[in-house]
Amino acid sequence: MGLKKILVDAIPAPLVRLFAAPYVSGDSIEAAVATADRVHRERGLLSTIDMLGESIETPEDARRCRDRYLEILEHIRDRPHCTVSLKPTSMGLKQGTRPTLENIEAVVRRARELGRGVTIDMEDRSTVDATLEIYRTLRAQYDNVGTVLQSKLLRTHDDVERLSDVGGRFRICLGAYPEPAEVAYRSKPRMKEALYELALRMLELGYYVELATHDEALLDRILVEAERRRVPKDRFEIQWLLGVPVMRMRDKYARQGVRMRLYVPYCDDWSHATRYLKRRLLLNPSLMTYVLGNLVLRGR
Ligand SMILES: Cc1cc2nc3c(=O)[nH]c(=O)nc-3n(C[C@H](O)[C@H](O)[C@H](O)COP(=O)(O)OP(=O)(O)OC[C@H]3O[C@@H](n4cnc5c(N)ncnc54)[C@H](O)[C@@H]3O)c2cc1C
């Protein structure tokens, strides 16, 4: 990982920005909403809009971020195909759990008034306890809030059981942050096996489950087993990142009547998009080839 990180860090920002084209919807709320409308109209996909904004330094930064989310909500008030996703650190987690809870609650409260959902993204392992505590507190009052669990973390098996008293809506994904072997599976096949086990257990416990993976074989396995267990289709959905090619899967799952949602990031500040893209590149260096191919094809 060391050398890979050094190489990815060395890529100049303008080049990363070039790579960003397929993965980031643009640099305004309007661009994100336009993308969400387009994929809904043309491909029948739902969206969750995310503002890229990490490393919030001060309580004022966090409140500004909260206010931007309140603005996004006004833009999607008449768009039932949209929800929002937000990162706890962008709402002030580095400054403490209490102010973060207050900022996120303001967004969740307004979203509920407008009939929209909010998902609290999960970041690295140091944030998991606080994020789940915030989710737990909010979920007791607001049924429109959900959060994320990462299958690579060993603790997630216990978290799934512990959360059964509050229940609710959970995105399950591998986890995008590098974690040490003491707390996480290091092999991708093992993370995927864990995602399979966790997704089925979450369905069993009655959670609404958001299957966030681009691995078609894994999705197929989960869907076949869910069907065998007669889990109704309104108890789960599939989620993908904007920019990852999923056309064939999308058509297949649409025919099966499965609900699908795209994660649609936009940035107010391109330096945030650069960080997001570098994280994606680190996870998947083959992305570079894919994006270059995409740019060449577009150029034709
Ligand atoms: C909707 C959504 C929300 C997420 N939210 C969070 C979160 O809150 N916290 C968190 O830690 N992580 C989050 N993630 C990231 C997640 O944890 C994984 O890091 C990421 O999804 C890659 O894992 P994968 O299951 O798709 O498997 P992979 O094995 O990485 O991907 C499967 C296949 O998909 C294709 N693929 C995957 N990514 C790309 C790409 N970018 N470009 C082209 N092809 C690609 C490749 O062909 C690859 O072989 C989210 C992912 C999604 C889809």
Image: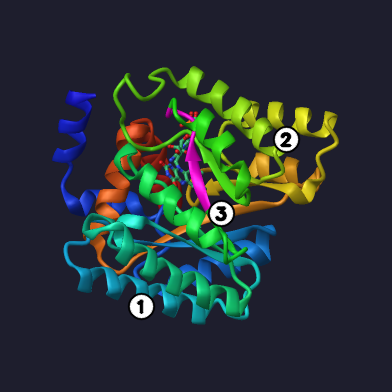
Decide: is 10 above or below 185: below
| Quadrant position of the N terminus in the picture | top left
Residue under label 1, please give it. 67
Is-magenta flag for residue 150? yes
Residue under label 2, please give it. 204
Q: Amino acid at mark 1?
A: Asp
Asked whether the viewer can see residue 106, the reply is yes
Q: Residues within 10 Å of mark 2 (few under 14, many from 20)?
A: few
Q: Residue 215, how many percent across, how many down? A: 57, 31
Decide: is 181 above or below 114: above
Label of residue 297 in the image: none
Asked whether the viewer can see residue 213, the reply is no
Q: Quadrant of residue 209?
A: top right
Q: Give me the C-alpha separation between circle 2 and circle 1.
A: 37 Å
Residue 179 placement, left or right of 77: left
What's drawn in magenta, residue-wise?
147-153
- Sequence-first disc among 2 and 1: 1
Q: Amino acid at mark 2?
A: Glu
